Amino acid sequence: MLTRWNEFDRTVSMLDDLHRRMDRAFYEEVPRVARASDEVYGRGYPRMNVHDTGATLVVRVEVPGLSDKDVTLSLNQDVLTLAGKRGADAPKGYSVHRQERAALQFSRSVALPCKVDPEKATAAMKNGVLTVTLGKVAEAQPRRIAVRAQ
C-alpha cells in the first residue's frame, strides 16, 4: 500500500515540475509590454477604484514608484485613459545582480458611468496613489426633489 502512495507522489511531483517549466517557457516568450496589464494576478494594471460622490467622480490609481512625469491622463468623451512607463532602476555604470521589477509600459482605459466636464478635471499624486477628480456635467448630477404635502 505504501508503494502506491510513493508512485502517486512521484507522479504529482513530475506534473508539478512540468507545469512550472511550461509556465516559465511561455512567460519568457511573451514580451514584457504585452504582459504589463496582466502583471498583478491577471487583473488590469494599475489597479484603480472609481467612486461617485454625487457632484464628482473620484478615481484612485495605485502607481507605486512612478512620478507625475511618468503618467499621462486623457479624457475622450466618457472614457478615461491612463498610460505610463517605469524605466529600469539600475543607474548607469552599475551591473544588475537580480531584477524582479522590470521596466514596463502600460495603458488602461475605463468607461465612466456618466458624462464629465473635462474643464473641471484635476489630478494629484501622493505616496504612489494618483487621485483624479472629475466634475460631472450639470445633467449628470443628482437633483433633490422637494416633497409637498397636499
Image (cartoon, rainbow, N blue to C red):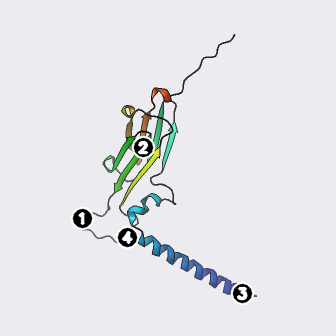
* Amino acid of disc 1: Lys
Q: Is residue 81 above or below residue 20?
A: above
Q: Which residue is mark 1?
A: 92
> Which residue sits at x=36%, y=32%?
119
Residue found farthest to the top = 150
Q: Which residue is mark 3?
A: 4
* Amino acid of disc 2: Leu
Q: Are marks 3 and 1 in contact (CB under 8 Å)?
A: no
Q: Classify mark 3: residues with Cα within 10 Å, few (<14), some (14-19) or many (20+).
A: few
Q: Is residue 51 above or below residue 33?
A: above
Q: Classify mark 2: residues with Cα within 10 Å, few (<14), some (14-19) or many (20+).
A: some
Lower position in the chain sequence, tag 1 or tag 2? 2
Q: Which residue is mark 4?
A: 98
Residue found farthest to the bottom = 3
Question: Looking at this view, is 84 or 115 the one in front?
Answer: 115
Q: Are marks 3 and 2 in contact (CB under 8 Å)?
A: no
Residue 76 is drawn in which quadrant?
Answer: top left
> Which residue sits at x=43%, y=35%?
134
Q: What is the secondary structure assignment of the residue under circle 2? A: strand
Lower position in the chain sequence, tag 3 or tag 4? 3
The quarter of the image holding the C terminus is top right
Q: Are marks 2 and 4 in contact (CB under 8 Å)?
A: no
Q: Which residue is mark 2?
A: 80
Q: CA distance from mark 3 to mark 2?
A: 58 Å
* Amino acid of disc 4: Arg
Q: Is residue 100 left or right of residue 142?
A: left
